[in-house]
Amino acid sequence: MQNQTSPLILTFGLTDPVGAIGIQADLAAFAAMGCYGLSVITSVAVSDTTGIEELLPIDPEWVADQARAVLEDMPVAALKVGAVANVETVSAIAEIAADYPDIPLILDPFLSSLPEQGMENEDLMSGLCELLIPQATLLLCSAVELSRLAETWREASNEDLMAVDATRIIEMGCEYLFLTGTPADAHEVGNTLFDQSGVLRQDNWQRIAGSFAGAGSTLSATFAALLANGLEVQEAAFEAQEFTIAAIANAQRLGMGKLVPDRYFWARENDNAH
């Protein structure tokens, strides 16, 4: 008799030799949530724990071919899109997502360690707004990243336009927006979940001292896995945050740069209990 299959999640992202971000980080978080990760490589990074030195984009046709081969063979429960290097890749992924509209799409396109790309970066922002965000079940980004996105439809401003910009994202067609780094006390980190009705939940967490590589990747990958497991978005939001905070609290110093969240902290806790 065939065993029941774990939920399958297809992630699009860069390959990171350190495993702090991108594909490798996603696969670890998926496994921690009882899911099986499938991957489409969008670019190859030369990186260490201090950050990314170089990025080699994969031909967008190869990106599309990788994804279609998997999607035509297996029942995928969720799609996760991480950082992409150029608007051509955004377009390729958007075409695939449009062909599978019933599969939830979790979008986490920003990576603070990616180098700025000038005008190409503006094209990338516009491509995200026009092609991928309207198809997203959930967009995850920081309040700062939301402001960068908003500059594709308004002038830069010193005013607090977070709520206005969040509403605009939802109006584009995105079902949910999860914002990190929203206003909170100095010793706390604030995160806010929005939908068409406005703020769905606001969570504040004690700030953990240190510099980390892969906290955002852990959060979005865990969110995707929880949705693939059938959780409602509000419940998934809380559990994804809780898991990410624990992974950061147990972060490891693998090199001379930033700390890397431990997505398998729970396994080591179980080992210590025996």
Image (cartoon, helix red, strand yellow):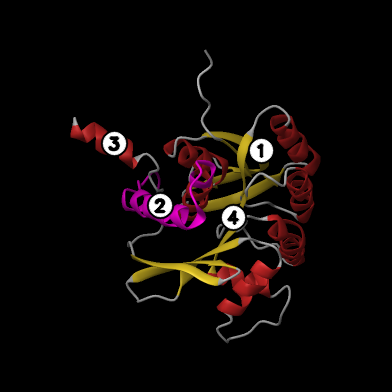
Q: Quadrant of residue 127?
A: bottom right
The outermost residue toward the top is 1
Mark 4: amino acid = Asp
| Residue located 68% across and 45% down the image | 102
Q: Which residue is denoted by mark 3 in the rendering?
A: 268
The x and y percentages for residue 270 are 26, 34
**In the rendered image, the vertical position of residue 13 relative to residue 163, given as above or below:** above
Between residues 113 and 271, which one lies in front from this camera angle?
Answer: 271
10 Å neighbourhood of mark 2: few (<14), some, or many (≥20)?
some
Label 2 vs 4, first from the N-terminus: 4
Asked if marks 3 and 2 touch (Cβ < 8 Å), the reply is no
| Residue located 66% across and 29% down the image | 74
Q: Which residue is denoted by mark 2 in the rendering?
A: 239
Between residues 177 and 2, which one lies in front from this camera angle?
Answer: 2
Label 3 vs 2, first from the N-terminus: 2
Distance from the alpha carbon under mark 1 to that under mark 2: 26 Å
| Residue located 61% across and 44% down the image | 45
Q: Is residue 147 left or right of residue 89?
A: left
Asked if marks 4 and 3 touch (Cβ < 8 Å), the reply is no
Query: Is residue 253 rendered magenta in the image?
Result: yes
**Part of the protein shown in magenta:** 226-255
Q: Which residue is denoted by mark 4 in the rendering?
A: 108
Query: Is residue 236 rendered magenta in the image?
Result: yes
Discs 3/2, front: 2
Q: Quadrant of residue 164?
A: bottom right
Element type at mark 4: loop
